[in-house]
Image (cartoon, coloured by chain):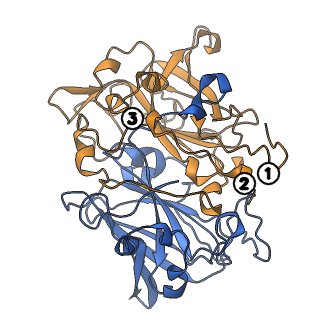
Amino acid sequence: MTEHTPSLGYLPETPSQTAGPYVHIGLIPRQAGFDIFENTLGESMVGPETRGERIRVEGRIFDGTGALVRDALVEVWQANAAGRYAHPADRQEGKAMDPGFRGWGRTGTNFETGIWAFETIKPGAVEGRRGHKPMAPHLNLWIVARGINLGLATRLYFGDEDAANAADPVLNIIEQPERRRTLIARREMRDGRPAYVLDIRLQGEGETVFFDL
Amino acid sequence: MNPDQEFVQRDTAAHPPAFTPIYKTSAFRSPRLPLWSLQNSLSEVTGPVFGQGELGPLDNDLVRNYAREGGEPIGERIIVHGHVLDGNARPVPGALVEFWQANAAGRYRHRNDRYEAPIDPNFGGCGRCLTDAEGRYHFRTVKPGPYPFRNRVNDWRPAHIHFSVFGSGFAQRLITQMYFEGDPLIPHDAILATIPDPAARERLVARLDLNAALPLHTLAYRWDIVLRGSRSTLFENRLQGN
């Protein structure tokens, strides 16, 4: 823990606490049952100008007893269709910014069905760490809920990207190949449009791979 | 990607572990397997950027942002303010800070809250702001009340405000809770008790700040938030940002 030795002037990170059962009030108030802001952040990810293939991603979250987690908040952060993040640190060459796409959204699991879903676009591949070989197209997911003390980070990869997934530097650091499958969404067709489905298991059999970033 | 943009390893000792039996719900919502450590790529050092134009003028005033015409929420008016800093003690400007809380009676405006305390017709209980160039945030609200919750049969939450904070990178994403100095429920709280380190628990307690109070009108509390810092590689590059 030398990184946080006070004499070096570093500050320790503020401790995390659970988002609790009422996280919806602050971050997705409509699900809590009321309207307050003119602009609810993260509610909609794509507009008419957004470039790229429209997709739906959805899934459920299960606890260690196999029960649905119906009070979770899920956030997504992703690159645009060209594989570029809308952020100044992304200086990848030859990949255009998309002014119609921020790449971030959030939603709650449904109080009845437990389903979370995003209407978004399929991202392009992004260069790997320090410009190394590319990462397969993926969404970064962050999950908080009552009973989760520190937000859980994971990724969603696409089931129709076998070659890219097989070469992905992040999937490949996961020691057990069968656990890599916990991050790969299966492609289905919904009303003539592609949907990618990924269930997340917080604990126990088939436990999703979560990352310490 | 510049190596200086990578974040330092998270000090897990500053946080609650995932499995904390005193907080019963965590027992079946905590991963059993270790997290896979991931060195930062662009996916972790980038994150959403927000602009002031996306927020409304009353978004950081919970006293007014849900009040009916001529109405005002019941309770003790307070200002909550502080800095958002990173682990290198640098201010984080433009950080989106969001907050939500119970009303003065300890009741949330939420369809799942069944506590028998009144809903305040003039209080929504949520707000947000962006930090300024010096990393400062502030908002006005009423002090939330304590309330019971289902854990042990007689568990009560101390008065608290929930905070959600975005830094520059998605790996800095943080949700936590702020408590009030002197609250007698603090030592009994099962949620605070999930944090093993007493010094870390203390960092979640806001201090009364009389200097920031509005005389004859509003009390103030101060609370600083620290997000993870980024690396400073002395030999790979020139010193950046420090």
Q: Quadrant of residue A125?
A: bottom right
Q: Secondary structure at mark 2?
A: helix
* The chain coloured orange in the image: B
Crowd band around label 3 with a 10 angstrom C-alpha radius: few (<14), some (14–19), many (20+): some
* The chain coloured blue in the image: A
Which residue does the numbered mark 1 point to in the structure image?
B236
Q: Secondary structure at mark 3?
A: loop
A137 in relation to B12, above or below: below
Crowd band around label 1 with a 10 angstrom C-alpha radius: few (<14), some (14–19), many (20+): few
B103 in relation to A140, above or below: above
Instruction: Tell whether label 2 touches label 1 (CB within 8 Å).
Output: yes
- The type of residue carrying mark 1 is Glu
Query: What is the x, y in percent for residue A191?
Result: 41, 88
B131 in relation to B178, above or below: below
Which residue does the numbered mark 3 point to in the structure image?
B121
Q: Is residue A38 visible?
A: no
Which residue does the numbered mark 2 point to in the structure image?
B3
- The type of residue carrying mark 3 is Pro
Query: What is the x, y in percent for residue A136?
Result: 56, 77
Q: Residue at x 37, y 49 (%)?
A: A32
